[in-house]
Amino acid sequence: REKRFTESRWKDIRVGDFVRVGSNEIIPADLLLLHTSDPHGLCLIETANLDGETNLKQRRAVPDLSSP
């Protein structure tokens, strides 16, 4: 496999692939958050398309992987 990010269609993503997600992107899959641009490894997600809730939920990246 290549060692850089390439553009792919969601249908071509497989278990074990690393996916780089930008701000405000819709993610049609379950992902493990490994790193964020936030210094504390935090991000906000909206799950309205899953559960109807429109409030943002705070999530934290895997602690040992998100440290500088």
Image (spheres, helix red, strand yellow):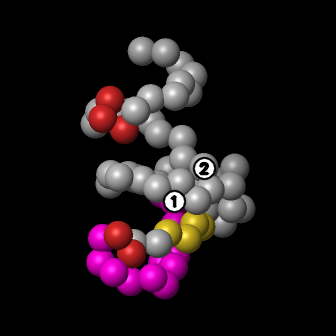
> Mark 1 packing: few (<14 Cα in 10 Å), some, or many (20+)?
some
Give the residue drawn at x 69%, y 62%: 38
Q: What range of the chain is rendered magenta? A: 50-62
Tell me the CA gap for discs 1 and 2.
Answer: 15 Å
Depth check: give the residue in front, 55 or 39: 55
The circle on residue 22 is 2
Q: Mark 2 belongs to which amino acid?
A: Gly
Q: Is residue 59 magenta?
A: yes
Residue 47 percent across, percent down from the top left: 39, 72
Q: Nearer the viewer, mark 1 or mark 2?
A: 2
**CB atoms at circles 1 and 2 under 8 Å apart?**
no
Q: Work out which quarter of the rendered image holds the N terminus and state it.
A: top left
Looking at the image, residue 54 lies above or below residue 29: below
Depth check: give the residue in front, 44 or 67: 44
The circle on residue 61 is 1
Can residue 60 be seen here? The reply is yes
